[in-house]
Image (cartoon, helix red, strand yellow):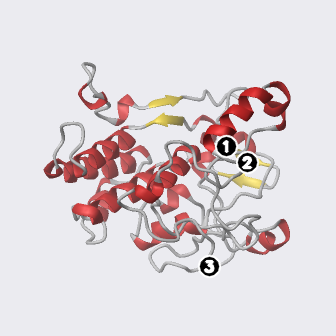
Amino acid sequence: AALAAPGGVFASNADAAMIAWPGDGVFNNPWSNNFATRDDHRMSQTLMGVLFANNDPRIPIYAQPTVNDTTVSALFPNYAGMPNGLTQATASVYFNDTSRPGVIFYPGATTYGTFGNGSGKSTPSYYMTYADVAFIEAEAANRSMGGLTPGQAAGFYTAGITSSMQQWGVAPGDVITYLAQPSVAYQGGLAGLTQIDLQRWVALYGDGGQAWALWRRTCVPNTVRPGPYAIINTVPRRFEYSITEYSVNANQVAAAVARQGPDVFQTSMWWDKATAAPTYTSGCGVRQ
């Protein structure tokens, strides 16, 4: 029904729902504010692995070169991701060998150096992008939902990738080269559905909550797993209720827990039916 709504859906990047931060020192992009004093953020090895696998031209936008010479990809030397789920002691040894997030999120001058020209203060925060809508349409078409047909999926898929690249400032020629790769060209069927979910996950960079929700629903990419020092052996499916919620709303918390199951990270949300998803793979989200 939403796809056929009278007002239509997003049709270009100009339609994106976002917060356009002034970057005036009072209202800055939150990542920029955080990075001004904290230097313990590094790119995830999981995301970087997906980007490297497809020679993704968003790598130098999403990430910064490493301090030390670190070659994981010959096409993108000196970019690398850090393993997830480390302790402070085990993470610190990676800091100079792995990439910070891209300068597009940095305020320029920080307490530990200067990164970029300060434009990160005004980088928008996106609630929903045209790329995300296009990938939703691509999935609907692939699965013959919402009045769409599988024959339309490739067009929506290509539009999703292209608009994401444009959103992040990738050169047009690099977009064409990327789309021409056999690993990226739309395959249709279940393989195509996996491609759609993977590209949508990559395009959601900067919107971790939505990317997490997408992964919980699809298990794509299936390389998302707990790190070696994670306190549980599975990727969390939800947040636990806070102490405050228990103290001021105990009756409703108890009622919710009775419906949904134990108040632990492993209990799925009501919409989280990953094991029933066509793209689900055995052992999804479990530490190996």
For marks 2 and 3 on the same chain, the one whose residue lies earlier in the sequence: 2
Quadrant occupied by the N terminus: top left
Residue type, numbered disc 2: Phe
Crowding near the residue tagged with mark 1, few <14, some 14–19, many ≥20 C-alpha atoms within 10 Å: some
Q: Quadrant of residue 128?
A: top left
Look at the numbered discs 2 and 3 and tell me whether their residues touch, using CB distance below 8 Å.
no
Q: Residue 35's mark?
A: 2
Crowding near the residue tagged with mark 3, few <14, some 14–19, many ≥20 C-alpha atoms within 10 Å: some
Disc 3 target residue: 70
Distance between mark 2 and mark 3 Cα atoms: 23 Å
Distance between mark 1 and mark 3 Cα atoms: 25 Å
Crowding near the residue tagged with mark 2, few <14, some 14–19, many ≥20 C-alpha atoms within 10 Å: many
Percent position of residue 271, x then y: 49, 43
Q: Residue 214's mark?
A: none
Residue nearest the observer in this picture, 103 or 2 = 2
163 left or right of 126 in image: left
Percent position of residue 40, x then y: 77, 58
Quadrant occupied by the C terminus: bottom right
Percent position of residue 131, x then y: 36, 43
Residue type, numbered disc 3: Thr
95 left or right of 283 in image: right
**Residue at image coords 41%, 56%:** 276
Disc 1 target residue: 31
Look at the numbered discs 1 and 2 and tell me whether their residues touch, using CB distance below 8 Å.
yes
**Residue at image coords 78%, 26%:** 249
Look at the numbered discs 1 and 3 and tell me whether their residues touch, using CB distance below 8 Å.
no
Percent position of residue 211, x then y: 52, 49
Residue most extreme to the left: 151
For marks 1 and 3 on the same chain, the one whose residue lies earlier in the sequence: 1
Callout 2: SS? helix
Q: Is residue 155 above or below residue 45?
A: above
Q: Is residue 234 above or below residue 141?
A: below
